[in-house]
Amino acid sequence: MHSNVRRARGSVLRALVWFVSGLLLLAVIAMVAFDWFTRAKYEPTLDAMRQEVTAHVDLFCQEQTKLAADPWFHEPRTEGDAGPLLNRWAEWDRPGPSMPADSPLQLPAHLKEKKTLEEWFAANPDLSALDFNWMRELKRFDRWDIRQNLPFKQEEPFDLMTVPFPNFIVLMEWSKLRLLQGMRTGQPLEAAKDVRHLAWLSYRTDTLIGSMIAYTLLGLERTAHALTKQPPSEWRPMSQEQGERLRAVFWASKSFSNITTPVEVARKARSCGSGISRCLGLVEASNMAKHLQPLAEPSYREAYAEFEKEMATPCPTSVLITQWQHGGTIEDHPPSSGSMPDQAGWMRSLPGRYFAKHIAGVLLTVANQDIDLLKKLPQ
């Protein structure tokens, strides 16, 4: 009788062991299937991104070197920050403040129409009420820090995607009118110098939007030169070819500093051609890198270590260091915050580092790599 009981217990135990083993096997199979399925969602895209920047880093350096030779990058400038003036004078995106009533950037009502330089040239507006002295005042500075001396409290954690930016459009409108005034008064070169310097300060915000404003302002100078019947021989705007190269190089710089980019490729892109796009690229790439740091750093330790090294070489403005030291991470933002892409929001509730790399991988596929303008430059 006792032997029958023992055999029965042994049978139950074996059945339980097999049952548990089966469950574990199914769990392992499910994990492997999940791993394969999830990696298939992002790894091919990340591999393609790495291959693209690696294949084009020599082209990037070639074009950046040509751009860095342009005289605009070598004009003498006085060292100093225009932020204390321009940040106070400017209108800011909400929730930032509107333009102060006493700001020299205020335009009369009849000059607030959105016209091209050619349209203003044909319209022949009255410019007598305009005072362009503020442009000359900015000649004392060589950079514009849009994160210091702010007329409002900067919230933390810092997020480059959501913080207020100054309204650069008003600078474009003033530049058109300054060039028009210069053509009228027979001093187009002096007006062009004012606009070229405003373009430099926009570029030296170390932001992509600032560099695109610089591209536009330099294009306005080129248009004014074409509209002037007998331009001074010493007036030499940036060529159309160099302008397109500026836009392409600055636009591509972010892609070469993404944490998905091989470290040696990123290092080469930031140092070649005098490194004129280094800070801009780091600023734009650091937002995603910082946001994903808790999830991505275990898989991209070398890239994050390289970012830390870059902090030892200061940029002209504080934007990069502010982003890196005070920027928010994915742990600071709820899924509905909208500050960064959240296509993998459902995965954020899953436990462990195993899932973290998948979350980071999926989100990194929307890092918006774009070097198309660079590839389209005539060779």
Image (cartoon, helix red, strand yellow):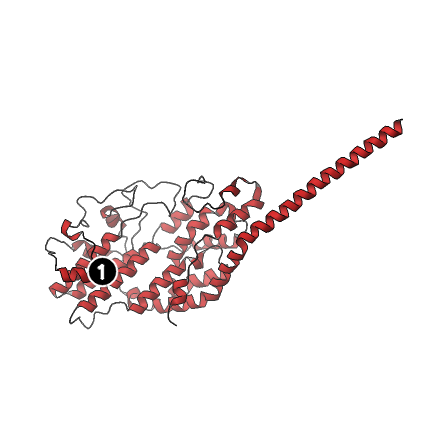
Q: Nearer the viewer, residue 179 or 22?
A: 22
Residue 68 picture location, percent across and down: 34, 66
Say which quadrant the C terminus sits in: bottom left
Residue 210 seen: yes
- Disc 1 crowd rating (10 Å Cα; few below 14, some 14-19, many 20+) is many
Q: Residue at x 22, y 60 (%)?
A: 195
Front residue of this view, candidates 134 and 292: 292
Q: Which three-letter amino acid code belongs to the residue tagged 1?
A: Val
Tell me where residue 141 sits by quadrant: bottom left
Residue drawn where x is 26% and y is 63% of the image: 219
Q: Residue at x 54, y 45 (%)?
A: 356
Q: Quadrant of the N terminus?
A: top right
Q: Is residue 103 left or right of residue 27?
A: left
Q: Is residue 204 visible?
A: no
Q: Quadrant of residue 186?
A: bottom left
Describe residue 218's horizontal placement relative to residue 286 as left or right: left
Query: Mark 1: which secondary structure?
Result: helix
Which residue is labeled 1 in the image?
195
- Whole-percent x, y for residue 151 in the image: 27, 43
Q: Position of residue 237 (x, y in %)?
A: 25, 67
